[in-house]
Amino acid sequence: MSELNHEQIAQRLQHLTELSVALNGLEDTDALLERILTTAKQLTKADGGTLYRPNKEKTHLEFDMAINDTLKLHVGGSQPRAKDMRSIALFDDYGHQNLAAVVAYAANIKQSVRIRNVYEADLFNFSEMRHFDEQNNYRCQSLLTVPMLNHEAELIGVLQLINAIDPETHAITSFSETDQGFIEALASQAAIALSNQELIFQLENLFESLVNLINIGIDEKSPNTGRHCQHVPELTMMLAEAVHRSDAAAFKDFRMSERDRRELWMAGLLHDCGKITTPVHVIEKSTKLETIFDRIHLVDARFEILRRDIEIRHLKNMPANDTDRQAAQQSMQEELRQIDSDRAFLKHANIGGERMSDADQDRVRQIAQRTWVDSHGMQHHLLNAEETDNLTIKGGTLTADERKIINNHIAVTIRMLEALPWPKHLKNVPEYAGGHHERMDGKGYPRGLRGDQMSVQARIMAIADIFEALSAKDRPYKTGKTLTESLDILGKFALNGHIDPDLFQVFVKEKVYLQYAEKFMDSAQIDAVDESKIPGYTV
């Protein structure tokens, strides 16, 4: 090939400049590699090019991409990968460097190789290349092989160009020293771009691992909450993908890129990170009287004392004649039956549930007024004020103060997330994660945001959080609800301003609930859902 003139050199420099800018903007590795290979072909007027990358163990070069104009060949990159391309060993069976294959030589020695005529060269084994020529009626002649090294001289890949084409005669010619210099410059740029991309991936994976580390910490405090931290992001992404596909007018502008998906996934993983500060005895409170242990046993012991005292009192005052004695014994049995009834009632009240009636709350307060005498002769009410407050909790097992402690986790979550220096593509994580306890009607917490003040992503996460909690079978304070029961409650939430009714439509219409159930719910919970009976859903 004749030497380049000033104009041609200027054009090549322009190509390199454009490639440098493009490489910084490409996030997809396959697209980045394809741009590298096509630019290398353009710079040298090569008929074909191949790109190899080392495997994870750095023992082989894996075929990554090939483009050949004459053969109209394009595999890898934006096209399907070739399945029959063999990798090239970097070492032989004895651990010595493989210097027989030109690609392995360039990788091991970290030097470029330029060959004028493959069929006249005897330094390397070109049997595979000649076999390829025979099969495809092609002839590889000139060759330029350049290792791609990063700033630490580590091998990132190998770029191989085949058959330089003279732009004037269109005949196959050899690659020039100038060609080699330009391709080495390109390979250096490409290696840096790939290294930077790999570094970004590693940092993102490290960050996600740290997030999972936080969730492991929460899991160690509460295995139940730990599963919640894993299931909510899964359900969030299921619903988000359904909204992305939806043709509903309310979501015509909602579309997600891969970056958007990663941002939402990260927010899902972190949505309850503030629970790492929540006391274990509150998270794991399975009964109303539970703290370090279930204090119903202390109450139970007081009932035993009451029974003993009743029996002693009656025995001491037992009448002499048979008729009065029989009446006294009957009276004692009635008192004992009442004691046992109250005792059983408090045990049941201690369990907690969806809703405690006013009558049952009043009965707890009446029982609390009973008195018992301790071993020092001191008289006490059967239940103290704190025990009475706990046993009259209207729903669930948490008192108002404990509910505040639980609810505070979202404020802590927001403070934790807003304290982090988020990169641009993750800047919405605090808003998405921090909004899953807000309500459409503005009655949620911690900021009392209305639906129009919340992103679609935050509203999606709110639904995922509630549905997971309803259907979870591993909570210490409840059993998992069936699909029908969960959808009934969620539908009522859509009607009363709790969750986004448009998102609920998508949730049911696109069968997101079933997709989630088949992956995470117990088969006994997956009943046949009659969608026509779901509140708030229009078939």
Image: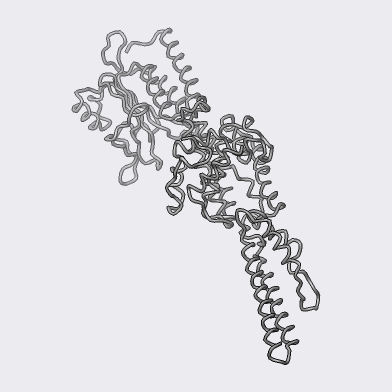
Could you tell me which residue is drawn at 71 percent across and 52 percent down?
400
Whether 432 is drawn above or below 469: the answer is above
Comparing 415 with 443, the one in front is: 443
Could you tell me which residue is drawn at 40 percent across and 8 percent down?
5
In the rendered picture of this protein, how many numbered marks are placed on residues? 0
Display colour scheme: one colour
Whether 506 is drawn above or below 44: the answer is below
Comparing 452 with 426, the one in front is: 452
Query: Could you say where residue 523 lies in the image, as x and y percent from the top left?
Result: 42, 52
Q: Quadrant of residue 279?
A: bottom right
Q: Is residue 65 left or right of residue 355?
A: left
Query: Could you say where residue 368 lies in the image, as x and y percent from the top left?
Result: 73, 66
Q: Quadrant of the N terminus?
A: top left
Query: Could you say where residue 336 lies in the image, as x and y percent from the top left?
Result: 67, 77
Q: Quadrant of residue 224?
A: bottom right
Query: Could you say where residue 85 lies in the image, as x and y percent from the top left?
Result: 28, 34
Could you tell me which residue is drawn at 69 percent across and 37 percent down?
447
Comparing 536 with 144, the one in front is: 536
Mark yes or no: residue 199 visible: no
Q: Is residue 234 left or right of residue 404?
A: left
Could you tell me which residue is drawn at 48 percent across and 42 percent down?
533
Mark yes or no: residue 121 visible: yes
Q: Is residue 515 left or right of residue 492?
A: left
Q: Quadrant of residue 515?
A: top left
